[in-house]
Amino acid sequence: MTDKLTATTDPDHPAGSGSAAGVEPVLLVNDADGVRTLTLNRPGAFNAFDLELKSQFLPALRAAAADDSVRVVVICGNGRAFSAGQDLKEHLTLTAAGDPAVARTVPDFYNPMIEAVISMRKPVIAAVNGVAAGAGAALCFACDLRIAAESATFTMAFAGVGLSADSGASATLPRLIGLGRATQLMFSGEKVSAAEALRIGMVTAVVPDANFAATVATTAGQLAAGATASYGWIKASLQVGVTSDLSATLAFEEQAQRACFASADHHEGMQAFVEKRRPQFQGR
């Protein structure tokens, strides 16, 4: 795991290797034991998505999905924020200049970002180290697991700047916490603490800041050592189940189970069960 995964990093003094020009890269990529960690690295801007970060993050998601050596993906932020969403300073400048990038940002980046996370046939963990707002919060909601530090907060900030919801939040948030509560949070822009987020089902775990990095690393490592091909089918089945009728869900479950019947991990799991040992899954 990258040492960027922290709830207490000083945003004014980020760690890590810089580029040849001495400038910190806006996205850090770290691989360890089947876990790929993507760290949003604009701590001075609360890891808000500007054009540069967008140009790197979406390809990085797609690369992780296509790389068979990657069995789990962790998304986190450096500094005091996970991500504040859209970089509004840049957005204002582009809007004032009539730049066509403004109109294209949702179809060209935010929509495919969410589709890449949800369609990825491997677990994706949002390691929410701090502030998650707007599209940054929506990115969390699209992930399979959301582990939050105690100091993390969530804000549906769209209406506060005169925007509607995007990045899939209109679908993902109501599924997590219900339509009524999602509507209230979208309208109010209320800041939700990590404890409250856990209570209403917005996150899957909350841990003390001091234990945050270790907990994320342990969870990711356990998943990476598991039957990751099976996780991919489970993830796809759940998406069908929440968007389709029962007949379509049953049909997809049959397809998924047939694929798993033929998998090496299934045979290893059965053999390990009979031999009363821990299975050694290979993710295939």
Image (cartoon, helix red, strand yellow):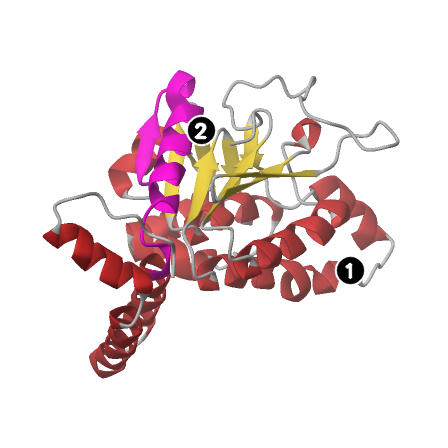
Q: Nearer the viewer, residue 113 or 252?
A: 252
Of marks 2 and 1, which one's residue comes earlier in the chain? 1
* Quadrant location of the C terminus in the rendered image: bottom left
Reading the image, the residue beneath label 2 is 152
Give residue 26's position: percent from left, percent from top: 71, 38
Q: Is 270 included in the stretch rendered in magenta?
A: no
Q: Residue at x 69, y 59 (%)?
A: 105
Q: Residue at x 56, y 61 (%)?
A: 66
* Identity, as a three-letter code, of the amino acid under mark 1: Ala
Say above or below: 181 vs 82: below
Secondary structure at badge 2 equals loop
Q: How many numbered circles does the render carry? A: 2
**In the image, residue 207 lies in the stretch drawn in magenta:** yes
Above or below, 10 relative to 19:
above
Q: Which residue is denoted by mark 1 in the rendering?
A: 101
User: Considering the numbered disc 1 on the image, is that residue within a helix, a strand or a loop?
Assistant: helix
Position of residue 167 in the picture relative to residue 27 (left or right): left
Q: Which mark is residue 109?
A: none
Asked whether the residues under the numbered discs 2 and 1 touch, taking CB atoms below 8 Å apart as contact, a structural biologist would say no
Mark 2 neighbour density, 10 Å: few (under 14) some (14–19) many (20 or more) = many
Give how far across and how far down residue 186 sits, in percent. Answer: 44, 49
Q: Is residue 222 left or right of residue 154?
A: left
- Say what amino acid the circle numbered 2 marks: Ala
| Relative to 273, 118 lies left or right | right
> Residue 277 location, x and y as percent?
17, 43
- Which residue is rendered at x = 27% and y = 81% of the image? 248
From which residue to which does the magenta span run? 203-229
